[in-house]
Amino acid sequence: MPSLSSWDRGSAASLFDRIRGEGSPPSPGADVEVLVESVKRQLDQVLNTRPGSCRSAPELGVVDLNDATQAGADIRGRIREAIRQCIRRYEPRIVHVEVRSPDEQANPLEMSFQVTAHVRLEHIEQVASFNIHMDSHRHYRMV
């Protein structure tokens, strides 16, 4: 039985993409967008997991909005830090991440965050920026 340590990690696709057979190794210098889109899909799944719902990784996910409000006044700061920590722990293709929340938002009840991440895989490194918005069902959506 092959061990996980011998698993080919040179793919731009996430583990779930490779299991489904959707991932293919990037062609040199051409598939940076494929890499970034794969990272976004993975983050969409990881960020919408709630802590405690995965037995093998109980801390996986981002704190629920209701749980964040019980801990104090800086709800946006707590969620921003939870998103940053979650990305650092569970997306190994990202080597550096910064999460910011805009000071002024059109709707004070709307949560949105700007993520700047350095995505690296073997010889490919790309700085990617994207926004995360919390929708009305309290799910995080990549934009």
Image: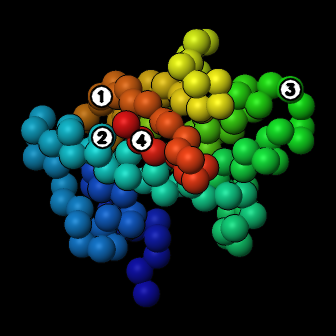
Residue type at tag 4: Met
Mark 1 vs mark 4, foreground winner is 4
Circle 3 — which element? loop
Circle 1 — which element? strand
Determine whether, in the image, residue 17 is placed left or right of residue 5: left
Q: Name the residue under label 1.
A: 126
Task: Tell me, yes or no, if residue 87 can be seen here.
Answer: no
From what the image shows, is residue 96 above or below residue 10? above
Residue type at tag 2: Val
Q: Position of residue 6 (x, y in %)?
A: 40, 67
Residue type at tag 3: Ala
Mark identifier at residue 73? 3
Residue at (41, 80) in percent of width and height: 2
Mark identifier at residue 36? 2
Q: How far apart are marks 3 and 4 (CA)?
A: 26 Å
Determine whether, in the image, residue 86 is placed left or right of residue 66: left
Which label's residue is closer to the chain start, 3 or 2? 2
Which label's residue is closer to the chain start, 1 or 4? 1
Q: Distance between the residues labelled 1 and 4?
A: 17 Å
Q: How far apart are marks 3 and 2 (CA)?
A: 34 Å
Residue at (37, 37) in percent of width and height: 143
Residue type at tag 1: Gln
Q: Distance between the residues labelled 3 and 1?
A: 35 Å
Residue at (77, 31) in percent of width and height: 75
Determine whether, in the image, residue 63 is placed left or right of residue 88: right
Q: Distance between the residues labelled 2 and 4?
A: 12 Å
